[in-house]
Amino acid sequence: MTQLDQFLIRAEALLGRLESILPRADAAPDWEAATAFRWRHRGGAAGGYLQAVGHISNIALSDLHNIEIQKQQIDQNTRQFVDGRPANNVLLTGARGTGKSSLIKACLNQYAPQGLRLIEVDKDDLAALPDIVDLVAARPERFIIFCDDLSFEEGESGYKALKVALDGSIAAQSDNVLIYATSNRRHLLPERMSDNATYKTTEDGDLHPGETVEEKISLSERFGLWVSFYPFKQDDYLDIVGHWLSHFGCNVEQIAEARADALRWALQRASRSGRVAWQFARDYAGRMTSND
């Protein structure tokens, strides 16, 4: 075997090892296969890909009750985006189970025929946001990148990645991409009493906020639109229960008879939320059907 043959064998082996650790070039997803996608991370340095979501929630805007102001704000912003007009990244915060995620899914169902698409990204994959934006920037569709139940502990890498993606990179955000995030925390990071120790009072009474507090609010401030959700009152909760019971086929008499059970169900869970109302309706309607 000549020295050239030995060199070629070693070079081929080296290329094989490099291919195993370098990110693979992924084929573009089938954009006609779905209106919603998930970003999947391969692990290590192998990059990621968009996976089509075959079955998505069929919830409609009309299914969401007692959040009319929030619904109007999100619907208006999304309509502007779909129409190619200026629109904002959105942070939806507040009480659990009040319709934050459902509202985004309902907007997808409303505007998918006009070209709206949704890409769900887990918090642990936020570092891939630049790659995702590059992947869709030349597409004719309009993309909402959806980060659900978002919150960070101090020092997590995804926090800075999201800050840069929202407003901080030398590259401008693509015109066909917006970020919608939901969270139970207004400022996305835990707030502690010790943060107040960084406030100092001067002789003339001026307050100087510490850098810790500034850092905690800097991410949420990069969302152009803040939409807050609040716990439901009892009548609002019962109204939502009635809507879903009707959706599952219960008649007016059954809905009226279900009120006491619905209140006990909420009391057991210490929550009068839309999610709890939907869960009760499924249970109650299922039992009524089995008794027929």
Image (spheres, helix red, strand yellow):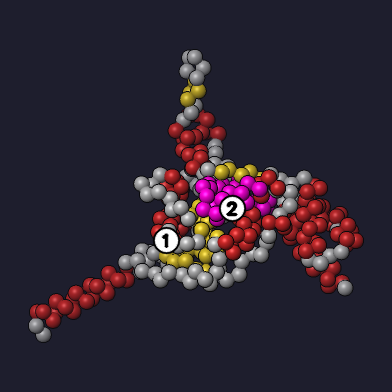
Where does label 1 land, which residue?
A: 138
Residue 88 on the magenta segment: yes
Give 118 or 176, whichever is nearer the viewer: 176
Q: Is residue 63 above or below residue 89?
A: below
Question: Upstream in the sequence, badge 2 or badge 1?
Answer: 2
Which amino acid does the dot numbered 1 rest on?
Answer: Ala
Q: How many marks?
A: 2
Residue 247 coordinates in the image, percent (x, y): 78, 63
Give 155 or 4, whichever is nearer the viewer: 4
Q: Quadrant of the C terminus?
A: bottom right
Q: Is residue 64 above or below residue 39?
A: above
Q: Quadrant of the N terminus?
A: bottom left
Residue 167 coordinates in the image, percent (x, y): 44, 45
Q: Please, what secondary structure does the residue beneath circle 2 have?
A: helix
Which amino acid does the dot numbered 2 rest on?
Answer: Arg
Q: What residue is at 72 percent from the left and 57 percent from the top? A: 63
Give 125 or 77, whichever is nearer the viewer: 77
Residue 213 coordinates in the image, percent (x, y): 49, 34
Determine which of the numbered discs, if any, sits on residue 79 in the image. 2
Residue 184 on the magenta segment: no
Residue 136, quarter of picture? bottom left
Residue 56 coordinates in the image, percent (x, y): 61, 66
What stretch of residues is rendered in magenta?
A: 72-100
Q: State if disc 1 and disc 2 touch (CB < 8 Å).
A: no
Determine which of the numbered discs, if any, sits on residue 154 in the image. none
Asked if residue 265 can be seen in this view, the reply is no
Residue 254, quarter of picture? bottom right
